[in-house]
Image: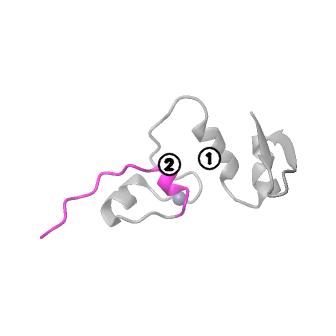
């Protein structure tokens, strides 16, 4: 799978998704792009940080910014009031 990435100056490069992490400095970005292509799937954990859907559901917290894309929406336990 190939991806086109660009910087703030408009410079663009087409590369294999496997090289996106090295070119951008964002660990897991290539895996995220692969996961976001094709049919949507329900992932059990964030491909970037490994935070699980269960952890997000139990704590109401996300492990990283990519969790909001990969794990959202989460089912939260009802608040105990
Ligand atoms: Zn994450």
According to the picture, the residue beneath numbered tag 1 turns out to be 32
Q: Quadrant of residue 59?
A: bottom left
The reply, left or right, for residue 68 in relation to residue 25 is: left
Q: In which quarter of the image is the N terminus?
A: top right
The reply, left or right, for residue 79 in relation to residue 70 is: left
Q: Which residue is drawn at 28% across and 56% down?
A: 76
Neighbourhood count class around disc 1 (C-alpha, 10 Å): few under 14, some 14–19, many 20 upward: some
Task: Write the start and end of the magenta stretch as one range.
Answer: 64-81
Can you name the residue that lies furthest to the top here?
39
Choose between 66 and 8: the one closer to the eye. 8
Q: Residue at x 67, y 52 (%)?
A: 29
Neighbourhood count class around disc 2 (C-alpha, 10 Å): few under 14, some 14–19, many 20 upward: many
> What percent of the width, then of the height, locates residue 62?
45, 63
> What percent of the width, then of the height, locates residue 42?
44, 39
The reply, left or right, for residue 74 in relation to residue 35 is: left
Of the numbered discs in the image, which one, if any, rests on residue 23? none
Choose between 35 and 65: the one closer to the eye. 65
Q: Earlier in the sequence, mark 2 or mark 1?
A: 1
According to the picture, the residue beneath numbered tag 2 turns out to be 70
Disc 2 and disc 1 in contact, CB within 8 angstroms: yes
Dot 1: element = helix
């Amino acid at each position: 799978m190939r991806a086109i990435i660009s910087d703030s100056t408009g410079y663009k490069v087409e590369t294999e998704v496997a090289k996106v992490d090295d070119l951008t400095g964002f660990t897991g970005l290539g895996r995220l792009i692969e996961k976001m292509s094709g049919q949507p799937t329900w992932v059990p954990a964030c491909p970037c940080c490994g935070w699980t859907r269960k952890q997000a559901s139990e704590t109401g917290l996300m492990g990283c910014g990519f969790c909001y894309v990969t794990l959202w929406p989460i089912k939260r336990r009802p608040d105990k009031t």
